[in-house]
Amino acid sequence: MEPAKKEFTREDLVKGIKNRQFKRIVVLTGAGISVSAGIPDFRSAGTGLYANLSKYNLPKPEAIFDLEYFKENPEPFYKLAKELFVEKEFTPAITHYFLRLLASAELLHMNFTQNIDGLEVIAGVDLKYVVEAHGNIRSAHCTACKKEANIREFMWHLKYEKIRRCECSGLIKPDIVFFGEDLPKRFYDNMDKIKEADLVIAMGTSLKVMPFAGLMSMVPEGVPIVYINRENTEVVRENLLFMEGEIDEQVLDLIKDLGWEIHLSAAIKRGLFRAALGHLLETPKL
Ligand code: CNA
């Protein structure tokens, strides 16, 4: 007879967080958690970024984030970045606030995110609990001499569709990790934190991009994994709880079952204030 497979249930999850049985929760996040904030993911059929790049006449969708392609043809990335980061204003979604609630309860060991939008930080998660594995849009550098560039000036150039160059004539790019670039040192310095986890939650990620997806194979045996996503992209193991569906709905239900609704509304109020203040501070003086 086959040994019975260990099961980890939603009840175990709620009880374990409530009783503080899980105190070192590592959360892996991807583009799916920011979709309801208005930022498309990469791979969702029809709505994902890759399905909507035909106007840029790229040799392949990935080219828009490819360093070598960018050095020859920066315009498509600049146009997309203008569309995403200048023409729209984004505020955190429920899941970003859930991260904030975990951090406030001192249960968040680390959030490894593939997102570059910084919405968990705007939601109030201290950067010391966040590893932005694919970089961020808060800073920028020259792709040639590597000198730091002024991000506000870069954003201003995006707005007026001007290509921003360094004094050395190199192209300026925000500190988003492109294909062909290594991940930030902070990712490698902190990746072992996942071995210290007593619970892992992965949300809104297809877990297809390496080396980020490799974090999953570092989760110690026996440690439960909760995977919240529209689809299960081949995560199979003991102690896996797959919560299928819309992230915001799943996370809101969880927040309700934890009795954290009051904390959620307080966190949203603080987040909205922070976002408003941020936009005020970011306005360049012309
Ligand atoms: P991905 O490969 O596009 O996967 C996203 C996953 O989320 C898919 O499995 C979707 O089914 C799922 N999903 C999308 N929306 C929802 C929803 N509302 N509810 C439940 N599930 C949903 O994205 P990954 O993050 O896995 O791939 C890594 C890429 C995406 C990294 O290089 C990121 O830099 C990049 N990216 C980031 C952003 C951002 O910063 N917001 C946006 C787009 C892409």
Image (cartoon, rainbow, N blue to C red):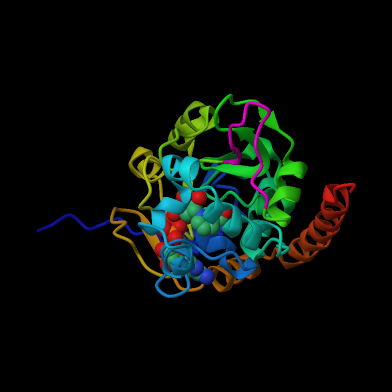
Q: Quadrant of the N terminus?
A: bottom left
Residue in the foreground of this view, choosing between 52 and 254: 52
Image: 141 above or below 277: above
From this viewpoint, is residue 173 visible?
yes
Image: 148 above or below 139: above
Q: Quadrant of residue 83?
A: bottom right
The residue segment tinted magenta is 162-175
181 relative to 172 in the view: left or right: left
Residue found 51% across the figure and 63% down from its top: 32
Residue in the foreground of this view, choosing between 265 and 222: 265
In percent of width and height, residue 159 lies at: 72, 56
Residue found 58% across the figure and 70% down from its top: 248
Q: Residue furthest left?
A: 1
From this viewpoint, is residue 226 visible?
no
Residue in the foreground of this view, choosing between 53 and 138: 53
Residue found 65% across the figure and 70% down from its top: 256
In percent of width and height, residue 204 lies at: 48, 61
Residue in the foreground of this view, choosing between 141 and 58: 58
Image: 24 above or below 34: above
In percent of width and height, residue 271 lies at: 79, 57
Main SS of the magenta segment? loop
158 relative to 254 in the view: left or right: right
In percent of width and height, residue 216 lies at: 37, 45
Residue 158 lies within the magenta run? no
